[in-house]
Image (cartoon, coloured by chain):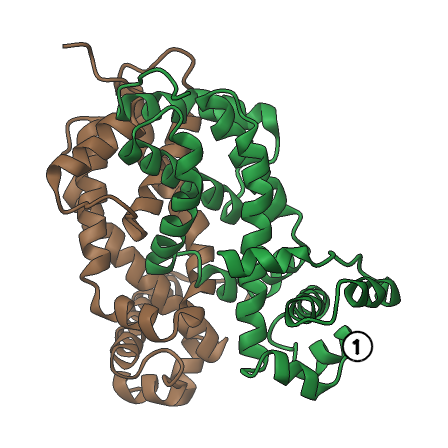
Chain colours: A green, B brown
Amino acid sequence: MAASLRLMDGARPEGAHEPAVARVVRLGGDDRSSQRVRIVDAALRCIGAQGLQKTTADDIAREAGISRATLYRTFPGGKDAVLAGVVETEVARFFSALAVTMGEADDLEDVLVAGMVEAAARLRSHEPLARLLADEPGVVLARLSFAKLDGLLRVASDFAAPFFARWLGPDEASRAAEWAVRIVISYLLSPSQGFDLADAGQTRRLVATFVLPGVVALGALGDPAP
Amino acid sequence: MPGGRDASSVAGEEARAVHAEAMSERILEATFACVDRWGIAKTTVEDAAREAGVSRATLYRYFPGGRDELIAAVVGFEFARFFDRLYDEVRDAASLEEVLERGIGFAHQAVVGHAVLQRILATEPELLEPTLTIEGSQILGAIAEFLVPYLERHELAPGVDVAEAADFLARMALSHITSPGRWDLADPAQLARLVRVELLAGIAPAPVR
């Protein structure tokens, strides 16, 4: 986690403003981590524009404004290694934003609602992800179902559980966090007419009706830890 | 298209329809056997036709979309078979709690024990998932519809809408069946805790004892 969080020091480029990005990256120093961020962000733009299958290491290098050799020096594994870097970086960015939102919540209902809304809104507005879900769903779904989803549930609930631990014991906090992650993924992959999880009001109603009573029932609630 | 139809041509059409269903089922069984043996990527139309004992041309008559249509159809076929078994397993359940416990427990074991599914998930998951999503939205609807009468018969918490609750429970059942996460669904005590304590607390809380 520390390694991937370091990647977040890099600036997030804005689509077409290529020269500005290059300047920011250079200002950030010519170290390996800023080079990695630059390549990862270029890969994200390529995936958003042309999908995953058609994106080559050459495309990514061109988009990042670097040579093929530089790309391979930074990511010796080529395209697959860049993609692993993309996932790692985006997950770190995602969790980092989520941590800010969830850390501000005042009670158990708020932390559930805040985490689910932030996660749903970020996933929904993630353009490369939307592109993949629309055109190459197998790539995403293969990572979000069956044993792969189990792995993700573990990672995501390990991340989220500490935010619940102010109000719940460790076992209940992990189960509540896992449940929230399941719900976000279910509504991401199969949107519902009744509940739009990116909408705070609708999510609060879902949480209050279906989730909070179960979370409360899972563990006897004590007073929140100081 | 011919304009008029006499009784014998109608009977002939019916016979042909029955024959067509038997034939497409035979081709799907054969395709399933090929997928079992070689996986999805390596299964060709020729393999499936040979296994079914029909010509390539005959196979294309039943599956004009060729390989892609055949693979999608075989996934749908296997799903239908799975849901028939699931339905047999839960049809006599007496309550909402029981239908969820038995359904989730049985379906999870069936997924874990499905050798062909597990092999595909391990070696070529990308090839399976596109068909799973299409099936997935239909499956959610089918599970929700199945749960509605159980919800209608149950005393529900104030303010709970039956259709919303059915949709939510269907999502959670499907999610746990395919990816149980922290829950050991082979353990009846954990299964009961998942269903009765976590999933149903807001919908159909247990009466105070």
In the depicted view, which residue is nearer to us: A70 or B108?
A70
Asked whether residue B14 is in view, the answer is no
| Residue A62 shown left or right of residue A17 in the figure | left
In the depicted view, which residue is nearer to us: A18 or A28?
A28
| Residue A48 shown left or right of residue B185 in the figure | right
Q: x, y percentage for residue B163?
A: 42, 27
The residue lying at 76 percent from left, 62 percent from top is A28
Q: Is residue B161 above or below residue B27?
A: above
Q: Which residue is identified by label 1? A: A65
Q: Is residue A182 above or below residue B8?
A: above
In the depicted view, which residue is nearer to us: A37 or B141?
A37
Q: x, y percentage for residue A145?
A: 39, 56
Tally of numbered discs: 1
| Residue B91 shown left or right of residue A179 in the figure | left
Q: x, y percentage for residue B87?
A: 21, 44
* Amino acid type indicated by mark 1: Gly
Q: Is residue B101 above or below residue A216?
A: below
Asked whether residue B205 is in view, the answer is yes
The residue lying at 22 percent from left, 51 percent from top is B108
Quadrant (top left, top right, bottom left, bottom right) of the C terminus of chain B: top left
Say which element carries label 1: loop
Circle 1 residues within 10 Å: few <14, some 14–19, many ≥20: some
Q: x, y percentage for residue B147?
A: 31, 32
